[in-house]
Image: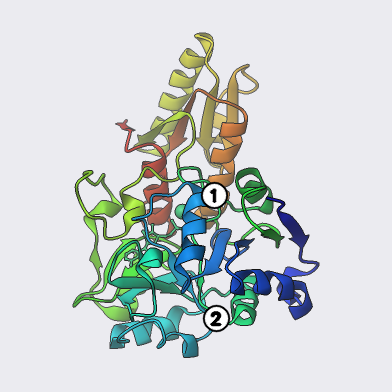
Amino acid sequence: MDTKIIRIADPLNVKDSELTEAAGIIRAGGLVAFPTETVYGLGANALDENAARKIYAAKGRPSDNPLIAHISCMDELPALVSAIPETAEKLAAAFWPGPLTMVFHKKEIVPYGTTGGLDTVAVRMPSDPVANRLIRLSGVPVAAPSANTSGRPSPTQAAHVIEDMNGKIDMIIDGGPVGIGLESTIVDVSGGMPTLLRPGAVTLEMLTELLGEVAVDPAISGPVSADVKPKAPGMKYRHYAPKAQMTLVEGTADKAAACIAREALKAAESGKRVGIICTEETRALYPDGVPGIVLRVIGSRGNEETVAHNLFAVLREFDDKDVDCIYSESFSGENIGRAVMNRLLKAAGYHTVQV
Ligand code: AMP
Ligand code: MG
């Protein structure tokens, strides 16, 4: 298949005329990758089971891993969900449009092909102007998982999408690098207690401040066994995975850096290529210019949003450079650091070392 790649001249001031063709493709059952504020999405008509099937095929994604339906405004929600609980109204007022997904009981119109066989549907209203406008122009809710090959790090730049999807989908919209760099926060509002299923830029702290009590799904911080029907099925699969074995070193930054530097030098001496994820604060604790070691400053500990922003691009770069193993420092586990640690733990297959 020929994939048409278009570039939005000014993504903050996108013109409808730039998105007309893309909206037509989605309406006709095709696939369009587009930028959002979280990561790039791979969009199709969420009400068309056939179109959903194409998403699973293009990504190589297991079909019991449900898709998030994206809407452009609140008026589009009642068509998809059987009830809008008060909690959801509060969350929508505070965080929509934005990087928050909510799980509701679905209406019949939403096909099981979109929800991975579940009676619930996950819905998000993106704030990114290109994403929001494209959904509005399509006139249908847009199912959009991350636009990566299943199992690879999510795409945060159009180049990542082109790497994974060129030749497999109808169109890729290049709207420049995304803002946040991690997938949306997911909260289940379909039961009694709101439950955090996936941490993201809308943090647990922000949710708790708004709602009082919020439950946290145990799968966020640990592996889920293979026979569990996943609540947020992204948790079941080894997501966000770089090709190399990754080790996450937990402990104070100084001790972690010392441990990583030692292990990396050993590995490099034995002929391996090693990727290291460090921070502005710890950069000076690592040796310079050692052959076989790729050292990357992922951001600043003082501002973990920068770490979130760069994480997936750095993991992809390590793939491109064919490193054999990756060592990463760990992060706070609070606020956006909770989402960063969740993705790092998954990328490492929960392989951690304490120092
Ligand atoms: P992505 O990995 O970017 O495609 O995000 C999709 C993720 O949203 C899935 O892997 C699930 O974790 C979550 N999700 C989608 N629909 C539901 C649902 N009905 N219930 C719970 N989680 C869902
Ligand atoms: Mg994904």
- Which residue of the protein is positioned furthest toward the right in this rendering? 9
Circle nearer the N terminus (1, 2): 2
User: Between 331 and 223, which is closer to the camera in this rendering?
Assistant: 223
Tag 1 residue: 148
User: Between 251 and 238, which is closer to the camera in this rendering?
Assistant: 238
User: Between 72 and 303, which is closer to the camera in this rendering?
Assistant: 72
Mark 1 residue type? Asn
Question: In percent of the image, x 61 and y 36: which residue is there?
Answer: 317
Question: In percent of the image, x 43 and y 85: which residue is there?
Answer: 77
* Snapshot quadrant of residue 247: top left
Q: Is residue 153 something one can see in this rendering?
A: yes
Q: In the drawing, does residue 153 fall left or right of residue 194?
A: right
Tag 2 residue: 72
Q: Is residue 112 above or below residue 95?
A: above
Residue 107 marker: none
Q: Is mark 1 within 8 Å of ligand 2?
A: yes
Question: In percent of the image, x 26 and y 56: which residue is there?
Answer: 230
Q: How many discs appear?
A: 2
Q: CA distance from mark 1 to mark 2?
A: 23 Å
- Which residue of the protein is positioned furthest toward the top in this rendering? 270
